[in-house]
Amino acid sequence: MPRTLTRRRTARATEAYSPAEEPEEEHGYADEEDEAPARGSRRGSRRSLNTEEDDTSSRRSRRSREDDDEDDEPAPKVGGKGWGSYEKTKQATSSFPDNFKATNESVIVHFLDEEPFLVFLQHWIERKGKKSFTCLESKCPLCDDAGDKPSQQVCFNVVDFTDPEDPQIRVWQVGPMVADILKNYAKDKKTSPINRDDLYFSVRKETKNNKTNYYITPVKERDLLDDWDIEPLTEEDLEEFDAKAYDEDILQVTRRSELKGIVREILND
């Protein structure tokens, strides 16, 4: 019986994000927007004012000595060199999630969600500047006035093992083709739920003659080390990644008035 870890999600507060303005097969892009102290017991509560003042003075003195000791410690090593340090500090300083993007090289991922945490419709408008816009669904100017058909976008939190020594949390935003593959795995008893702690997936894509195929293969935890030279995530690792997981708040929606302006721009071209 595969062991199943029950994890409690604490979604972190995030700002909405917008990935790079580059189209990719079966991948969409999220939109941007331009908005009484506790009582002690009776016993020992009778204390003289001088005793309280002495205790307060003593605590202040101890804190002062501790602060001095910390100041005397050698400075911690910070910073670094190379692209690895660049990516690490970039993620630490950015409130925007990084997208996972499949390539022609197989990469191991672990799902943090048993189902999509966000599903939305997105317009892609070929224009100078920003191209991706979240569909308003109801009374959407890009649908009603420009006649543009939006595409479905499906988002999952994954742990990306592109660098096995430094796995990172990413948002994998996919189209219906990949979503259908993942849905089938989610329904299969052998691979359900897809975020089981003993289950990983190998992901690769291949593009030929303008046609893209995705190869998504389950990988058991017991095979990770031997076949992929990757250490499985511990329960502590999983809890830490779960605490960093993104939720639907990452998506921002462009105001209807701005979308109407884009429609006018399209129609005037």
Image (cartoon, rainbow, N blue to C red):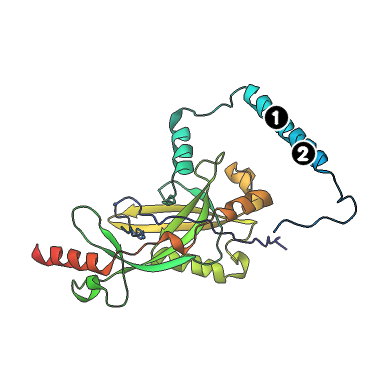
Residue ID at (79%, 38%) = 55
Q: Quadrant of residue 1?
A: bottom right
Tell me the residue that label 2 is attached to: 53
Image side of residue 131 versus residue 250, left or right: left
Residue located 59% across and 54% down the image = 243
Q: Nearer the viewer, mark 2 or mark 1?
A: 2
**Where in the figure is residue 180, as x and y percent of width and height?**
45, 68
Residue occupying the far front of the picture: 49
Q: Residues within 10 Å of mark 1 (few under 14, many from 20)?
A: few
Residue 159 point in image, percent of width and height? 54, 51
Viewer-proximal residue among 231 and 122: 122
Q: Is residue 234 above or below residue 89?
A: below
In the image, what residue type sits under mark 1? Glu
Q: Dividing the image into 4 quarters, which one contains the C terminus?
A: bottom left
Nearest to N terminus: mark 2 or mark 1: 2
Residue 162, compared with residue 263, is above or below; it is: above
Query: Based on the displayed image, in which of its 4 quarters is residue 74 positioned?
Result: top right
Mark 2 residue element: helix
Residue type at the position of mark 2: Glu
Q: CA distance from mark 2 to mark 1?
A: 20 Å
Where does the image place residue 127, in percent across and percent down from the top left? 18, 57
Q: How many marks?
A: 2
Residue 211: % across, % down = 31, 58
Instruction: Provide the secondary structure element on which disc 1 rests.
Output: helix
Image position of 230 with respect to 118: above or below: above
Residue 234 appears in view: no
Q: Residue at x 64, y 57 (%)?
A: 197
Q: Is residue 96 left or right of residue 112?
A: left
Labels 2 & 1 near each other (Cβ < 8 A) = no
In the foreground, 52 or 233:
52
Name the outermost residue toward the left: 268
Q: Which residue is mark 1?
A: 66
